[in-house]
């Protein structure tokens, strides 16, 4: 129901917006047709919905069409209430009357309130009310009367509107149903209305003619009531002051009560009581409850409508009869009743409740009387008599302690006051006469000294106040008489001897309570005349009367006069204060005298309690500034007098006399501003006060470490050494009342510095000596006291000044300095050091302004200077402790703490400009300490203002025409400012730059040249960046690359320009400040223009602007406000514009469009300027618009998710939080929401889908396991970079708010909680490495806040978060290590640095954590983080030892992060020859095993990734193998686990682990190929797994490895591979065609082979045609047709070579043309076999060229092709070479490896060029080779151009240095590096210039791979010893320096190293591709160990840095090697190939 209520409240605030929600609730209500059914029944949800609708109507003041449905629902339910009186109506949960009554009460309450809000609805309700209520009254006697009674009970609390006609019927019905006695005869009627003749007949005869007589209850009560009336005042005979006689005369005067009845005869009082008891007991409690309800309902009716006069007379009669019987009922004693115990109490409660309802009904019945009528006056007087009589009866009753009796008494008096106030005149005068005895009686019964005199006394008090306030202006004399009558009763004498002992005690009680009553009356009335009337009597009694001697009466009078004085009337105040001061001083005179031992206890109470409380009360009550000032002076003078008098009493302590006065002094000083000019007399009084506070030990202890408590006597007679007291006052424990201690703290805030005179204020001891006891200065006692005071002073100063050093300081001076120390230290310990004064915490309110005042006095003794300096430092320490103790405060307390800190810092900054050097030094020292302890001051705007600008404001006033001092001050300021800015930049460069820009804007706004020039000079030398910087050392926040990129964005600089370059703070700050000023000026100018022309016409404004805003104002309740201002209109116009523009940017981004960077930045900047321009205004309009704009400014960069957009975001966010710090929490909240949204939408850093994972996705399924994914359209790196910038801003903000804003810290905690939640949801892209670990670093930094106190209350949550951070950090290593290169400058270096910072942080944090763990283990166990019994952790689960396990995980994470940092460092600086890991200790095999176990326990994938990082570590691999075998069932989803249990050994042993393979996840194709090698012997389970893997991938993906699959047929004893090939061939035509071509290429002419494998090869050769035939037989007719056309076409083209062979060379080209013309293209599905995605559209018949060859004639033919998936009209040429007589299979293998390398380079983002042209064997020694387009060989280039490559490039691309030449050189470098890596692996030989091609942009392409791996020309003589060709002419292009020192050479080597490192990552995939071709018979496998040597060249045993060094050596070795030049010379000489 609570949620439903919240929803309803929200709907009521804006019903138009949430109309659908209201309709939904209405639909949940019972429908009208169901309510009108015969036996309706409702559910609990029905009732809840009805209550909700009623609540809505009660809270929605405006009626609209949306409310009509709700009103109809309520009306229908109201009409159906009679049906609810059946139990079947209610749901089962409403099975009690209380539950039903609660529903009725809530429902009727809402209905009544809604009727008050809407008159129309009230009329509609009134039409149903009478019928419903009458039905409920009629049902009250049925079997189910409980429900109707519950309804009536609810009605009695909330009665809805009713029609007058229904009201008459209802009252009649109530009289009838509840058996209420009505007047049965005209005589009774006359007794009610004796002066009227309009109602002479009995209403019973009219309205109840057919009714039976009333029941016995009604008829029997009448005579008893009449009997009671005759004795109504029988108990009033013993009232004080003749009250009873006066009361009787009052009844006679009222003359309206005629008591009939015959019960007062001879039976006596006893008989009468018994009759009354019998009569009362005949009434049942149930009937009484019914009467109560009836009377309440009638009172409600009378309150709402006017009823028939006759009926009204009956109501009055019934009420009168009830009130007449009240007195008799209350006079009965308990023993008179037959019933006793709970039954009697229930009856009394019920009866008194009836009387209370009757009284209310009686009062309501008088409201319709004519004010001037005689009858009405008589009725009023009669009613007053009845009510007062009843009130007195309550007061004297034995039941007066009952709550119901107290309520009855209160209601009676309330009615009396209401009548008197309303009527006035005679009733008021008569009432005042009658009220006095009532008041006296109440005073006689009330408790004299209790905190509360009881409800009845309070009621009397309240009624008296109301009557006096009313009569004060209407009829003053009776009021004065009444007050004086009460006042004089205090002094009335009583003859105590003639009264019994009991009554003697009553007299003081009456007096005491009358005194209190009079004081309360005066306070409530608050009239000076009343005070002047009473106060003289009180003072006279105190001075001369009974109260002049100590007594309770005197104490009560002193309390009363102090209360009167506190009202602030000057005359009474002065008289009272003089009296109280004289009384207090008189108590001192008796100290030590003989008579003091016989003092009454009241005398001590007066001195210790009453007078001090009175002084405090006056201090609290005075409001007048004049009187408070006077009272302050009087109190301080009193304290001075008391101190001197008490101190002079033979050395006794004066604390007992001075202490009680301190609370009053503290209160009167609470508003005193000590910074204003103080009169010397007042200052001396303050000095005296603190002197005695120090002397008497009244100040709270100020030492940090308090000694053990000692019992100290606090009595007046305690005699002890003053030194002992002083020492204990310093160290504690406190000896006196704790209230005195608090008072001293309050006094300290309002005490000015105790510098009485600016000259020699401490040298003149005359005044100080006058404060001291003259007797104590005699003899050696003075020196003893002085030594003690010096010791106390030394202790107070924290030991900074030794006691011997104070020998020149006298005793009184020491006491005075001790007082100063107490004062200044207490200022800071009490509230942090903020003085009284203005409400805002400004610099002037810093208590340092007082502390520093003492240092300004010249010519002080050195010892005094040391003491004062020490005092300032102790005060500073106290302030620091106060601030640190409140680190975890939130809300307003946190704001006060921060404001206090900033006020102190600003004062210290300003003090640096003081003329005195020692003051400047102290200020700098303290400021430096404050800055280091509380870094938040670095980014406070006011502190920075003071620092940057105050030197010009302060020095002119404080340094008077002293050029040298001015120079020193400026130099000091510049030094401090520089340190300040550098430190702030090192922690939070974004916010710091934002603030600096704001200050530059401010300086520009002020147009003050000098400040601006100085600020510029200060900033000119400061730079920040990722390079070397002398500004700061160590791992600061500014060393985090993400923070630096964010800082560049915040400065306004471009990210691409700022990467890796030191950023000049000055230049960027000036530019950005100018931009901000310009935008602010644009907004201001537009605003002025708009206002000057009176705004724009609404019709020409934006759509919906005119009418919509009017409706909005109407809806928002602004109708009664002034018209909309022009500013509001201007703001609304611009808000609409900016919101629309920003939404357009978001729409463009969501549709995949590109957002214009400059336009987006300008729009955001203008919108920010608009937002900030309204921050200073008090306008409350357009709040929703500004909120929406702020939200869009925070969210748009997240939506767009590009680095450019995020740069703009960081810029404007920094602008917002710098210019308006109050927006910090709002901005951060929106950004956290946006961040969490990117997690939910999986963007950027949280793009956890595989397709965003970079290399892992791009290399699927060839080199990485998993289904191939469609790559995303959006570059994931762009979004990651955006997150990186964003994260830098978050870290910056964390550093700013970590010390001072728990609210913003909790927002960041929410962000980190959502970020680190399960499951692991981060991107696996390697480009996210640095960003990821920077985020983890933020998480760990955040968790350290528990140690700093900010988040101590959240320690458990922080520990859990820390575990989640570590878990997430380890989760990064669950995936294989990858490389990635981007176009961002120094991106790799920043990635490495990010991880290094994380490593550095863990290294430093580990020690701290271990210490804190060892110290706080018990605490940790206690808070539930670790359950010591079960050893269960909420994150890590069951652990044998949680602490040990956590440390193991930290060590594992540290080691992995160090390795990752090393990897990234190598990638970032591949040519760096420095070994960074050499200094690290070697890891033992036991440690490796521990790491493996820990990793496997956290996540098995971490263990496999761990092993891939250290592939040569045998102990690691062995341990993981064992773990895999023991946890085989848990890791079946991890393909990386296969090599650990699928091994040749496991196959040989037929291991049971292989049974898990059917359930294993698919691996990569290259991994599967390894299992096809002979080493695995075709094991059926392994083969089944391999084939399942291959079949899980599309056949087109497997086609790449067709040569390997064909070779696998050699070992396919189970024909499983063959089966897969046949199935895949049926699935894909292209797969089948490529397979057939490869099968044909493997077929060879049978020769008698001598090798041992000839038999196996023969079987393989025999199998191939069979497989080919089976494939063809499996074709569908359509597939068969395509096969024949495709193969026939290219067979015809290939056969041309045979036709040309007999022809002469000069005729061969023409022959090619003739043969090509014969060939026709059949269909459009034909494609190039080397490139299936290229469809053949024609043959260029003139393109046929015969090529040179020793064998048959190869030909080159050009085809016209189109892309299969591209534009069909985009026809391109593609040349192919058709070879006959050459084996192309080795080229295929080489190009496979090159293609894999190209894919690897592209996947990791490396800019390396490889061109794996297509080659396909189509038959025995036949094949097709793609021609590399737009290329010519180096040999061909030499035939046409003289010179080397360097000259050729200049001829082709222009001079050196031109863009075209350098572009061609770059292309040459990236292609040369790519082929250098490929050449290193493949070892291609025969690299003459005919096999090197260059394309038209300068890229190098290698062709002809006839000699690779272990083979080389010349009978494998391996003349070409270099790993790749790098001839002299090539080095000329690569290295202009010629000595390997140029940038281009370094670029080439870096690319080579990176390419090699990327290739090594996939060592197994590359080797497996080659391995399966081992038995193919290719020449490259004919000698040596090609596979082993290939593995050696990849060096898996090397670390990445070692591998980089190896590749550098390879490049150096190949550089212009002589064997390369020699081979080119041989080829030139032998073949004529140009060199």
Image (cartoon, rainbow, N blue to C red):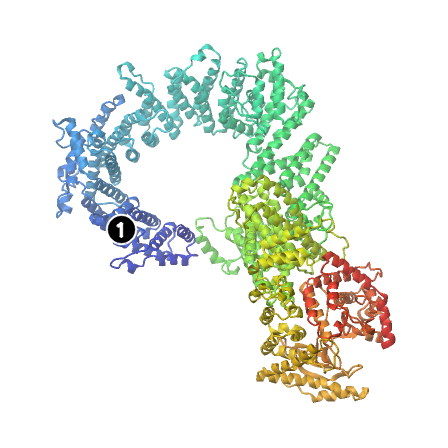
Tell me the residue at 69%/87% (across/down). Answer: 1719
Q: Characterize the local packing of mark 1: few (<14), some (14-19) or many (20 or more) Cα atoms within 10 angstroms.
A: many
Report whether residue 547 is seen.
Answer: yes
Q: Nearer the viewer, residue 342 or 1156?
A: 342
Q: Nearer the viewer, residue 1301 or 356?
A: 1301
> What residue is pinned by disc 1?
129
Q: Quadrant of residue 1779?
A: bottom right
What quarter of the picture does the C terminus occupy?
bottom right
Q: Quadrant of residue 1946?
A: bottom right
Q: Nearer the viewer, residue 793 or 1086?
A: 793
**Could you tell me which secondary element the residue under label 1 belongs to?**
helix
Tell me the residue at 44%/24% (across/down). Answer: 614
Task: Tell how many labels.
Answer: 1
The image shows residue 1958 at horizontal and vertical percentages of 70, 62
The image shows residue 661 at horizontal and vertical percentages of 49, 23
- Left or right of 1907 in this view: 1579: left
The image shows residue 993 at horizontal and vertical percentages of 66, 48
In the depicted structure, whether residue 748 falls above or below residue 1259? above
């Amino acid at each position: 129901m609570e949620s439903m209520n919240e929803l309803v409240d929200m709907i009521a605030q804006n019903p138009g917006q949430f109309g659908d929600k209201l309709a939904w609730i209405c639909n949940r209500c019972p429908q009208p047709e169901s309510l009108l059914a015969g036996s309706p029944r409702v559910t609990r949800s029905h009732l809840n919905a009805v209550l909700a609708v009623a609540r809505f109507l009660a809270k929605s003041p405006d009626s609209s069409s949306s409310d009509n449905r709700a009103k109809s629902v309520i009306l229908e339910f109201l009409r159906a209430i009679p049906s609810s009186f059946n139990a079947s109506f209610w749901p089962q949960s409403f099975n009690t009357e209380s539950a039903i009554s609660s529903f009725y009460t809530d429902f009727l309450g809402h209905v009544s309130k809604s009727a008050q809000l809407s008159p129309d609805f009230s009329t509609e309700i009134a039409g149903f009310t009478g019928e419903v209520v009458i039905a409920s009254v009629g049902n009250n006697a049925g079997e189910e009367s409980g429900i109707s009674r519950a309804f009536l009970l609810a009605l009695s609390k909330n009665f809805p509107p009713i029609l007058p006609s229904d009201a008459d019927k209802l009252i009649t019905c109530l009289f009838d149903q509840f058996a209420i006695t009505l007047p049965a005869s005209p005589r009774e009627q006359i007794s009610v209305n004796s002066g009227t003749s309009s109602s002479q007949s009995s209403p019973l005869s009219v309205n109840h003619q057919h009714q039976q007589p009333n029941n016995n209850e009604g008829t029997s009560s009448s005579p008893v009531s009449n009997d009671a009336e005759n004795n109504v005042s029988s108990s009033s005979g013993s009232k004080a002051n003749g009250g009873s006689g006066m009361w009787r005369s009052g009844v006679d005067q009222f003359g309206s009560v005629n008591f009939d009845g015959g019960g007062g005869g001879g039976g006596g009082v006893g008989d009468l009581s018994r009759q009354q008891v019998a009569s009362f007991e005949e009434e049942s409690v149930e009937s009484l409850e019914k009467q109560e309800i009836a009377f309440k309902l009638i009172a409600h009716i009378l309150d709402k409508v006017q009823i028939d006069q006759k009926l009204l007379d009956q109501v009055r009669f019934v009420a009168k009869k009830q009130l007449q019987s009240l007195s008799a009922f209350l006079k009965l004693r308990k023993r008179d009743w037959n019933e006793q115990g709970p039954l009697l109490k229930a009856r009394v409660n019920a009866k008194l409740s009836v009387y209370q309802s009757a009284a209310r009904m009686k009062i309501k019945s008088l409201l319709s009387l004519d004010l001037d009528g005689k009858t009405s006056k008589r009725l009023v007087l009669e009613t007053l008599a009845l009510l007062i009589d009843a009130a007195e009866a309550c007061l004297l009753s034995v039941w007066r302690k009952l709550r119901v009796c107290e309520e009855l008494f209160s209601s009676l008096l309330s009615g009396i006051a209401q009548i008197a106030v309303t009527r006035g005149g005679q009733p008021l005068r008569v009432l005042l006469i009658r009220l006095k005895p009532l008041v006296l009686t109440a005073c006689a019964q009330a408790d004299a000294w209790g905190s509360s005199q009881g409800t009845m006394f309070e009621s009397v008090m309240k009624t008296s106040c109301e009557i006096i306030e009313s009569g004060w202006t209407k009829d003053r004399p009776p009021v004065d008489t009444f007050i004086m009558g009460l006042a004089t009763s205090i002094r009335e004498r009583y003859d105590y001897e003639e009264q019994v002992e009991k009554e003697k005690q009553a007299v003081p009680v009456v007096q005491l309570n009358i005194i209190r009553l009079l004081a309360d009356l005066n306070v409530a009335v608050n009239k000076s005349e009343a005070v002047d009337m009473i106060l003289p009597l009180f003072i006279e009694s105190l001075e001369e009367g009974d109260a002049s001697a100590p007594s309770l009466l005197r104490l009560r009078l002193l309390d009363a006069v102090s209360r009167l004085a506190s009202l602030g009337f000057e005359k009474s105040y002065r008289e009272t204060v003089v009296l109280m001061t004289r009384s207090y001083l008189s108590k001192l005179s008796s100290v030590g005298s003989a008579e003091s031992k016989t003092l009454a206890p009241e005398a001590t109470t007066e001195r210790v309690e009453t007078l001090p409380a009175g002084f405090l009360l006056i201090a609290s009550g005075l409001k007048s500034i004049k009187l408070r000032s006077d009272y302050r002076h009087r109190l301080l003078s009193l304290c001075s007098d008391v101190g001197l008098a008490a101190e002079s009493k033979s050395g006794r302590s004066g604390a007992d006399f001075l202490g009680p006065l301190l609370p009053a002094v503290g209160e009167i000083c609470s508003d005193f501003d000590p910074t204003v000019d103080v009169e010397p007399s007042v200052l001396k009084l303050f000095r005296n006060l603190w002197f005695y506070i120090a002397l008497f030990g009244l100040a709270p202890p100020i030492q940090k470490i308090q000694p053990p408590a000692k019992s100290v006597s606090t009595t007046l007679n305690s005699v002890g050494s003053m030194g002992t007291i002083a020492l204990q006052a310093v160290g504690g424990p406190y000896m006196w009342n704790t209230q005195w201690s608090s008072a001293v703290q309050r006094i300290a805030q309002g005490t000015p510095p105790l510098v009485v005179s600016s000259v020699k204020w401490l040298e003149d001891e005359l005044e100080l000596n006058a404060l001291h006891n003259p007797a104590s200065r005699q003899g050696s006692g003075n020196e003893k006291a002085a030594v003690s005071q010096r010791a106390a002073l030394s202790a107070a100063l924290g030991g900074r000044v030794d006691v011997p050093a104070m020998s020149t300081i006298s005793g009184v001076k020491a006491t005075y300095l001790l007082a100063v120390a107490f004062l200044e230290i207490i200022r800071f310990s009490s509230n942090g050091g903020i003085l009284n004064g203005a409400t805002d915490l400004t610099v002037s309110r810093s208590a340092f302004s007082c502390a520093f005042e003492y240092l300004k006095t010249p010519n002080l003794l050195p010892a005094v200077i040391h003491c004062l300096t020490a005092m300032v430092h102790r005060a500073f320490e106290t302030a620091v402790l106060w601030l640190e103790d409140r680190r975890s405060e939130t809300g307003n307390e946190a704001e006060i703490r921060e404001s206090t800190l900033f006020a102190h810092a600003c004062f210290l900054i300003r003090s640096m400009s003081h003329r005195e050097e020692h003051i400047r030094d102290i200020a700098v020292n303290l400021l430096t300490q404050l800055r280091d302890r509380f870094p938040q001051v670095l980014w406070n705007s006011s502190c920075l203002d003071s620092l940057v600008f105050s030197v010009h404001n302060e020095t002119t006033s404080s340094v008077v025409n002293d050029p040298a001092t001015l120079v020193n001050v400026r130099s000091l300021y510049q030094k401090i400012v520089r340190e300040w800015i550098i430190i702030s930049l090192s922690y939070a460069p974004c916010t710091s730059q934002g603030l600096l820009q704001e200050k530059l804007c401010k300086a520009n706004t002020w147009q003050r040249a000098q400040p601006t020039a100085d600020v510029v000079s200060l900033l000119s030398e400061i730079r920040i960046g990722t390079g070397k910087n002398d500004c700061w050392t160590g791992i600061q926040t500014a060393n985090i690359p993400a923070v630096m990129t964010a800082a560049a964005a915040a400065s306004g600089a471009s990210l691409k320009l700022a990467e890796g370059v030191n950023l000049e703070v000055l230049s960027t700050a000036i530019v950005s400040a100018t931009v901000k000023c310009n935008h602010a000026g644009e907004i201001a100018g537009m605003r002025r223009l708009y206002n000057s022309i009176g705004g724009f016409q609404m019709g020409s404004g934006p759509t919906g602007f005119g009418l919509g805003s009017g409706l909005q104002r109407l809806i928002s309740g602004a109708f009664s406000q002034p018209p909309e201002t022009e500013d509001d209109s201007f703001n609304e116009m611009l808000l609409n514009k900016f919101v629309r523009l920003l939404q357009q940017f978001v729409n463009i981004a969501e549709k995949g469009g590109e957002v214009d960077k400059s336009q987006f930045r300008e729009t955001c900047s203008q919108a920010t300027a608009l937002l900030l321009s309204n921050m200073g205004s008090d306008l409350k309009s357009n709040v929703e618009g500004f909120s929406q704009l702020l939200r869009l400014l925070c969210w748009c960069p997240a939506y767009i998710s590009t680095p450019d957009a995020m740069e703009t975001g960081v810029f404007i966010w920094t602008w917002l939080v710098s210019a308006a710090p109050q927006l910090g929490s709002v901005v951060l909240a929106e950004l956290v929401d946006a961040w969490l949204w990117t997690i939910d939408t999986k963007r950027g850093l949280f793009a956890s889908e595989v397709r965003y994972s970079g290399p892992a996705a791009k290399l699927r399924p060839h080199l990485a396991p998993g289904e191939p994914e469609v790559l995303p359209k959006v570059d994931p790196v762009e979004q990651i970079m955006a997150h990186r910038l964003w994260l830098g801003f978050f870290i910056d903000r964390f550093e700013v708010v970590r010390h001072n804003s728990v609210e913003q810290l909790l927002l960041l905690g929410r962000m980190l909680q959502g970020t680190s939640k399960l499951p692991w949801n981060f991107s696996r892209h390697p480009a996210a490495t640095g960003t990821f670990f920077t985020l983890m670093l933020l998480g760990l930094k955040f968790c350290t806040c528990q140690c700093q106190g900010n988040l101590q209350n959240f320690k458990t949550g922080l520990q859990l978060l820390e575990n989640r951070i570590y878990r997430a950090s380890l989760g990064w290593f669950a995936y294989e290590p990858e490389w990635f290169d981007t176009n961002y400058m120094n991106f790799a270096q920043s990635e490495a640095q990010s991880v290094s910072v994380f490593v550095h942080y863990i290294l430093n944090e580990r020690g701290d954590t271990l210490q804190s763990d060892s110290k706080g283990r018990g605490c940790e166990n206690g808070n539930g983080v670790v359950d010591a019994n079960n050893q269960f952790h909420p994150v890590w689960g069951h652990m044998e030892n949680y602490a040990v396990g956590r440390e193991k995980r930290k060590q594992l994470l540290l080691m992995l992060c160090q390795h990752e940092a090393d990897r990234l460092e190598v990638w970032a600086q591949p040519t760096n020859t420095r070994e960074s890991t050499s200094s690290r200790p070697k890891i033992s095999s036991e440690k490796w095993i521990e790491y493996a176990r820990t990793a496997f326990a956290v996540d098995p994938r971490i263990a496999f990734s761990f092993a891939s990082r250290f592939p040569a570590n045998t102990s690691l691999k062995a341990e993981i193998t064992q773990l895999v075998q023991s946890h085989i069932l848990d890791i079946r989803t991890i393909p990386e686990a296969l090599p650990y249990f699928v091994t040749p050994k496991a196959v040989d042993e037929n291991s049971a682990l292989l049974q898990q393979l059917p359930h294993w996840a698919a691996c990569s194709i290259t991994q599967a190929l390894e299992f096809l090698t002979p080493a695995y012997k075709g094991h059926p389970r392994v083969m089944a797994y391999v084939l399942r893997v291959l079949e899980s991938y599309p056949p087109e993906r497997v086609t790449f490895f067709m040569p390997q699959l064909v070779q696998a047929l050699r070992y396919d004893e189970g024909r499983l591979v063959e089966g897969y090939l046949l199935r895949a061939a049926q699935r894909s035509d292209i797969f089948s065609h490529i397979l057939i071509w490869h099968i044909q290429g493997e077929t060879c002419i049978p020769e008698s082979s001598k090798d041992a494998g000839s038999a196996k090869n023969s079987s393989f050769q025999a199998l191939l045609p069979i497989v080919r035939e089976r494939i063809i037989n499996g074709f569908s007719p359509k597939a068969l047709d395509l096969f024949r056309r495709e193969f026939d076409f290219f067979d015809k083209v290939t056969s041309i070579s045979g036709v040309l062979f007999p022809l002469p060379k000069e005729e061969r080209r023409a022959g090619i043309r003739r043969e090509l013309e014969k060939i026709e293209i059949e269909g459009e599905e034909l494609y190039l076999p080397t490139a299936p995605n290229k469809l053949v559209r024609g043959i260029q018949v003139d393109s046929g060229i015969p090529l040179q060859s020793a064998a048959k004639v190869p030909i080159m033919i050009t085809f016209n092709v189109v892309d299969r998936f591209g534009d069909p009209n985009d026809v391109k040429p593609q040349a192919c070479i058709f070879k006959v007589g050459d084996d192309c299979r080795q080229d295929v293998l080489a190009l496979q490896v090159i293609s894999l390398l190209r894919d690897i380079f592209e996947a990791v983002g490396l800019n390396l060029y490889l061109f794996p042209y297509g080659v396909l064997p189509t038959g025995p020694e036949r094949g097709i080779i793609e021609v590399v387009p737009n290329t010519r060989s180096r040999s061909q280039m030499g035939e046409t151009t003289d010179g080397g490559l360097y000259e050729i490039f200049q001829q082709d691309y222009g001079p050196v240095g031109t863009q075209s030449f350098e572009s061609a050189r770059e292309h040459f470098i990236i292609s040369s590096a790519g082929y250098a890596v490929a050449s290193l692996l493949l070892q291609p030989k025969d690299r003459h210039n005919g096999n090197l091609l260059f394309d038209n942009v300068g890229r190098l392409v290698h062709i002809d791979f006839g000699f690779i791996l272990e083979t080389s020309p010349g009978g494998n003589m391996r003349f070409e010893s270099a790993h790749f060709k790098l001839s002299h002419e090539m080095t000329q292009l690569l290295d202009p320096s010629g000595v390997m020192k140029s940038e281009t050479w370094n670029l080439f080597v870096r690319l080579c190293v990176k390419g090699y490192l990327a290739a090594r990552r996939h060592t197994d995939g590359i080797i497996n591709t080659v391995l399966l071709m081992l038995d193919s018979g290719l020449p490259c496998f004919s000698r040596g160990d090609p596979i082993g040597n290939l593995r050696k060249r990849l060096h898996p045993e090397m670390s990445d840095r070692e591998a980089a060094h190896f590749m550098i050596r390879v490049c150096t070795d190949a550089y212009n090697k002589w064997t390369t030049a020699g081979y080119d010379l041989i080829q030139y000489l032998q073949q004529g190939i140009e060199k």
